[in-house]
Image (spheres, helix red, strand yellow):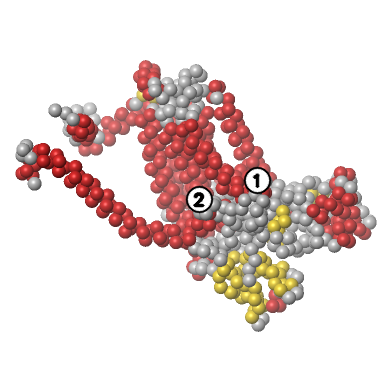
Amino acid sequence: MSDTHASSDMAGQDDTQEPSRRKLLIGLSLGSGALAAAAAGYPIAKAVLDPAFQKGGRGDWQTVGQLTDFPLWKTVLVTFIRPGARSFGGDIKKDTAYLTRRPGDWLALHNVCMHLGCPVRHQEGSGLYFCPCHGGVYNAEGINVAGPPRIPLQRLGVRVEGQDVQLQSAAMPLPTLTWPGGDS
Amino acid sequence: MSNPAQTKQAKIDEANDTPPAVTEKKYGLFLGWLEDRTGLISRLNTVAGHRVPKRSKWAFVFGSATLFAFILQVVTGITLAMFFEPSSATAYQSLQRISTPGTAEAMVRGLHYFGASLMVVMMGIHLIRVYLSAAYKYPREMQWISGVVMLLLVLAMAFTGQTLRWDQTAVWSVVVGAEQASRAPIVGPILARFLMAGDTLNAGTLSRLYALHTYWFPALLFGLIGLHVFLVLRNGISEPPVPGRRVDPRTYKQEYQARVKKDGVPFWPDAAWRDTVFGSALIILMAFLAWKFGAPALSKPPDPSLINADPKPDWYLIWYFSILALWPYGITNLMIILAPLLAIVGLIALPLVSNKGERAPSRRPWAIGIVVVTVGMIFSLTLLGYREPWLPRFGTPPLTAQQVNSTDPSVVRGAALFHDQSCILCHKIDGQGGIRGPNLSQIGERLTKDQLTWRIQNGAASMPSYAGVLTTDQLRDLVNFLASRQ
């Protein structure tokens, strides 16, 4: 190759060959680079982005107390474990809900304000739930009645197994975009 | 024979030629060796000696002050990373350890904390200075745009930095951030779960925020700072604006070079001494603050089952926290995403839609107006954020018999209802209660009993309706009590 290169007779031929040879070299470099980036990038992107595509929703049933812990009409704050939370995560795995036992049924409200997710506080007399962050107010049913929230507090499932009161855990509820005038 | 392709190749060859060996004695033995092998000395000398416009005085120090603050943040941040455990179970304890008053670690944490404020403030002033003097116009559009991207990255650093404080406030800040992001159309929930590293808070949340704060965002910032500084050197420092001297892209570069050649001064030390002295003075001030006040206090542990929380961002983001409470409620979900998006688009588009013409603020009164209104809004929203009028005053005690000041049993019962039905959380009577709603100390003078009944039954945007909550008797007692407040 170097011999023919040196010959001036071959220069013309070289000139016509060079562009296609260069194209091949460029293609080879970019192609192998892209392949390498994809080979290393796929597992990286998958690891980083997989959590972003979790679906949320309901988790397992957890015992949060005994029937005697829940007198009629009393709203009780209970703690449950977030679905999928790792045991080594420390306290971060805890989440809370307000349980109210009523004649014939239960009301369980996930304690996540549907404005920006702060924990709300139940008020004994009025039965209202107030959010400390931006003053959202929900009524005893968990319906948004004043302030910024546009969506009611999310309800959780409750069941009684013997004396155990069980709550169906759930991921963090996310308020999605609502247009002005829309209800949810 | 020369065809265009050969000429082009010749130019590339010329630019890439290996420089000749350094034979001059002017660098001395050691520096001469270094210059011969690296060429860095002559390049540094070129940068230091390049001419900059005269009269670029104290108004021009804020960009470099931001860089000084960044360097402080990098050094203190790396130091903190040697002590901080980015594990959601133990981070809080490691922070308590770092924050032990009187230790060097606590002072480093204080430096990082005050340095963050310094960086945000210097960046803000730099932005205002560049905007007011229209230094973003031709040929410095890319400087402005890279600056806007850095502004967003610095705010992202500020936010993630506050969450690494992994106390109660930090945890709820993550939630508030995720719930905001979830409002974006289509990608909202994906963004929210990306931030939380899952569909709810979990052990990976802190690790992810830590990686973003200490690796990703700084890496991007390093690259962008490099670009930004390179462009400042390439395009030259903008001149102080002169009324009537208009920027014309066809002639600007020649005119700029001619003026700088005529009466410019070497960057170092004629112009740069101000940058150095100002930046150093600020860092000394930060060291004093860190020594005097130490590390910022941690709030309660990161346990989401402790629900008595009042999460708030650091002072420079409070204004935004206030806005979130104050949008008209009907459009709040839309504005959470739309408003920041419009601001970003507007900032990036600015030099693209307006890159020529007058630069002097005196000829651009609307620019002054925009700055005054924006700074005024941020200032007043910050004050409001500390007053927190929207915060229900939890735990306000019932009114005393002396305050109620009546023997009418209906009024006394109404006063008890005023407390028990949570009215007092948002309404003040005789200096007791919240400030969300109007002060009701003299409400009996302003509203009739019918009007009071109507309002209590119907509520308002920020007040829940009590129809169906109060019995007829309770409503009558409450109205009697309020009507007696005169």
Q: Is residue B469 above or below residue B48?
A: below
Residues under labels 2 and 1: Cα distance? Answer: 27 Å
Q: Amino acid at mark 1?
A: Trp
Q: Total of numbered circles in the picture? A: 2
Looking at the rendered image, the quarter that the N terminus of chain B falls into is top left
Residue B129 image position (x, y, % from top left): 51, 30
For the residue pair B307 and B27, the one nearer the viewer reads as B307
Q: Is residue B285 visible?
A: no
Q: Secondary structure at mark 1?
A: loop
The residue identified by callout 1 is B327
Q: Which picture quadrant has residue B421? A: bottom right
Residue visible at 41% across and 25% down in the picture: B249
Residue B209 image position (x, y, % from top left): 48, 55
Residue visible at 48% across and 47% down in the picture: B157
Q: Amino acid at mark 2?
A: Gly
Q: Secondary structure at mark 2?
A: helix
The residue identified by callout 2 is B161
